[in-house]
Image (cartoon, helix red, strand yellow):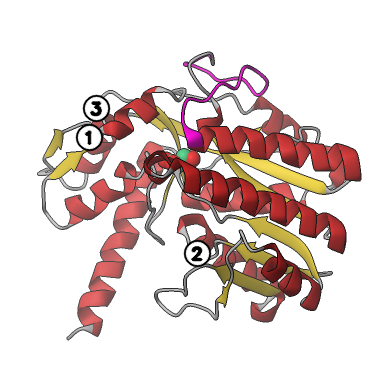
């Protein structure tokens, strides 16, 4: 991706924050254009303010900067989308249509679409969701992800636009905060645990979901986008997997380091969303096609999260002294 500029939409979101940083570290600050509807909170980089539903604004920046690669991360997550279905359709679908149209018209080389385990629904095998199987999501978020995957595949077949996609599990990381997702509990719980506070979980203790550590998710994204075109044999979202756990299992893993952690369970509307998703997904295609492999399991993730969040808290308290 050295040969042309990289544009990231949603650069200040949960995944965007970490992906943009990684891309800038590899390819150089000015080679990567961070765009978002909001400025970066910690002033990490200059954000080009961009609303992806405004096609002409997107067109202008892609043209001016001669963008060759787009990572399109701007989207509403599952829980927010369920509260605002119309807006979710608008942002998730119009935004993506605009990216595809502009990429096609301007000769962009490669485009990344973040899909999700939310593409699955009640007709999917719950214990191990296959790469190719029924996609009957019951959430609006899942509907936009299925439609988005298929639209991306269509642009590949119709125009040869090199669209690549991953079905992310719930992503856990210390670098950024999630917003409006059903899997957000798995990050919130670490903050409460480290503050010595009890945590009230919005999912039932036995809700098992596919999850991944942020470092693995970022590596998967960059490896997929760097892979030679001949290796990409799936043009809908690739299933990628790392681990699956329940809130009770995560709490137990955290208690290895913070034995006093108290968790109570008060499931809300997000329980129904989680219950419509599979417990585990089969990522054989990603492993075979472009040698995908995860590095972090539940224990490695928990240890790394706690180490980094402790360091962050220490740095914060020192900077305030
Ligand atoms: N982590 C996402 C969410 O909970 C799933 O893609 O919405």
Which residue is painted at 11% across and 51% down in the image? 197
Position above or below: 67 against 300:
below
Q: Please provide the residue range marked out in magenta.
A: 125-140
Position of 314 compared to 164: left or right? left
Residue 290 visible in image = no
Q: Which residue is mark 3?
A: 204
Q: Are marks 3 and 2 in contact (CB under 8 Å)?
A: no
Establish if 238 lies above or below 123.
below
Q: CA distance from mark 3 to mark 2?
A: 29 Å
Q: Mark 1: which secondary structure?
A: helix
Residue 143 drawn at (x, y percent): 56, 32
Q: Nearer the viewer, mark 2 or mark 1?
A: 2
> Could you tell me residue 18's position as x and y percent?
51, 62
Asked if the residues shown at circle 1 and circle 3 are in contact, with their CB atoms under 8 angstroms apart, the answer is no
Q: Quadrant of the C terminus?
A: bottom left
Q: Is residue 178 magenta?
A: no
Whole-percent x and y of residue 294? 56, 40
């Amino acid at each position: 991706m050295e040969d042309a500029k990289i544009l990231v939409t949603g650069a200040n979101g949960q995944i965007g924050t970490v992906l943009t940083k990684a891309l800038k570290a590899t390819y150089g600050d000015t080679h990567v254009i961070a765009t978002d509807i909001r400025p970066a909170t910690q002033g990490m980089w200059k954000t080009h303010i961009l609303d992806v539903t405004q096609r002409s604004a997107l067109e202008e920046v892609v043209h001016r900067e001669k963008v060759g690669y787009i990572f399109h991360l701007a989207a509403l997550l599952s829980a927010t989308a369920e509260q605002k279905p119309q807006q979710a359709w608008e942002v998730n679908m119009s935004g993506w249509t605009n990216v595809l149209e502009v990429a096609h018209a301007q000769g962009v080389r490669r485009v990344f679409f973040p899909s999700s385990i939310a593409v699955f629904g009640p007709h999917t095998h719950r214990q191990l969701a296959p790469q190719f199987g029924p996609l009957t999501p019951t959430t609006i978020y899942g509907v936009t992800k299925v439609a988005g995957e298929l639209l991306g595949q269509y642009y590949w077949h119709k125009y040869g636009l090199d669209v690549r996609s991953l079905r992310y599990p719930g992503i856990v990381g210390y670098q950024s905060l999630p917003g409006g997702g059903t899997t957000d509990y798995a990050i919130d719980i670490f903050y409460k645990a480290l503050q010595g506070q009890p945590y009230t979980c919005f999912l039932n203790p036995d809700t098992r979901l596919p999850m991944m550590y942020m470092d693995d998710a970022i590596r998967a994204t960059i490896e997929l986008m760097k892979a030679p075109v001949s290796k990409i044999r799936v043009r809908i979202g690739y299933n990628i997997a790392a681990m699956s756990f329940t809130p009770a299992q995560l709490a137990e893993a955290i208690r290895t380091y913070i034995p006093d952690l108290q968790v109570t369970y008060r499931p809300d509307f997000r329980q129904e969303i989680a219950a419509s998703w599979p417990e585990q997904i089969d990522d054989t295609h990603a492993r075979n096609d472009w040698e995908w492999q995860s590095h972090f399991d539940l224990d490695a993730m928990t240890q790394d999260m706690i180490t980094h969040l402790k360091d962050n808290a220490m740095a914060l308290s020192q900077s305030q002294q």
